[in-house]
Image: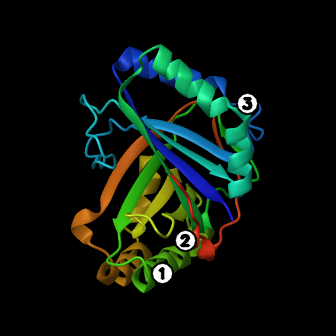
Amino acid sequence: MAVALVAFLHPWSESKSDRIKSLIKETLPEDGSPAGLATTRIYATPSTRPKAPAQQLTSTKPAGTPPLLIAEVNVYSSRRALDEYLAQGSLKAFQKSVADESLYAHPGEMKLWSVVGGFVNREQRERDVAGGKTVMLARFECKDSGAGKGKVIEALSKFAAWVEQNEPDTLTYAVIARPSGKADSNHVMMFERYSGPEAIAVHARGKEFKAMFKQIVAYIDPKQTKIAEFIEGPGSFAGKTDTDASGSALSSKL
């Protein structure tokens, strides 16, 4: 079962944000081959596009306008693959550099999610050499972490299958869910990537999208739905990843 490590980083300033991004890029292989057993590694900063959604996904409100924030989504083929990556010490080395250089205004926020539906990428390996693709994160708060959450995952996954077949400019449409036993185990999030803003517009105005939302609205708290748009950083890469609807039962300390 695949897992996604989602992090939000809070730089002190634009210059320190640039430094954090350079540290991230140093860990990305030039050829887009798996790094630390990750099938997908995306880092992105808030979109500056007019009217782009920019709701707060973080516990701490980012400073600045646009927000000083870096989002990371790293997908691993299994929890074992993630554990092997953590054992290599790359994350600890990154965190040490950040601490030594005082790059964060607030501690980074990191959580583990199960990849439970949809698709992370159509191709075996796709690398965004120049950056610039559009990333969307949409978090839903389900009314319960049991049957209701299951209904949301089912509807999103079914819609994702349609998206994969009918929206070629939607590059990623993955359903991820928080593990059981957590205070936020009722949270489900969409990890989406698009070729550009035009692809988002096509996606959002489709009758299939509206029908999907009608299916899930009874099981979520719409007022707690949070959506934010980001721009992908150079060197990010995405690859095919198996999804498993049983993944919502994953146990984790993160």
Disc 2, disc 1: CB below 8 Å?
A: yes
SS class, disc 2:
helix
Residue that mark 2 sits on: 248
Residue that mark 3 sits on: 29
Residue visible at 53% across and 32% down in the picture: 233
Residue visible at 51% across and 80% down in the picture: 154
Q: What residue type is labelled 2?
A: Ser
SS class, disc 1:
helix
Residue 150's tag is: 1
Instruction: Where is residue 29? Give x, y as percent.
Output: 73, 30
Q: Earlier in the sequence, mark 3 or mark 2?
A: 3
Residue visible at 41% across and 71% down in the picture: 206
Q: Which of marks 2 and 1 is nearer the N terminus?
A: 1
Q: Which of marks 3 and 1 is nearer the N terminus?
A: 3
Closer to the camera in the image, 61 or 107: 107
Mark 3 or 2: in front is 2
Mark 3 or 1: in front is 1
Instruction: Where is residue 204? Give x, y as percent.
Output: 38, 64
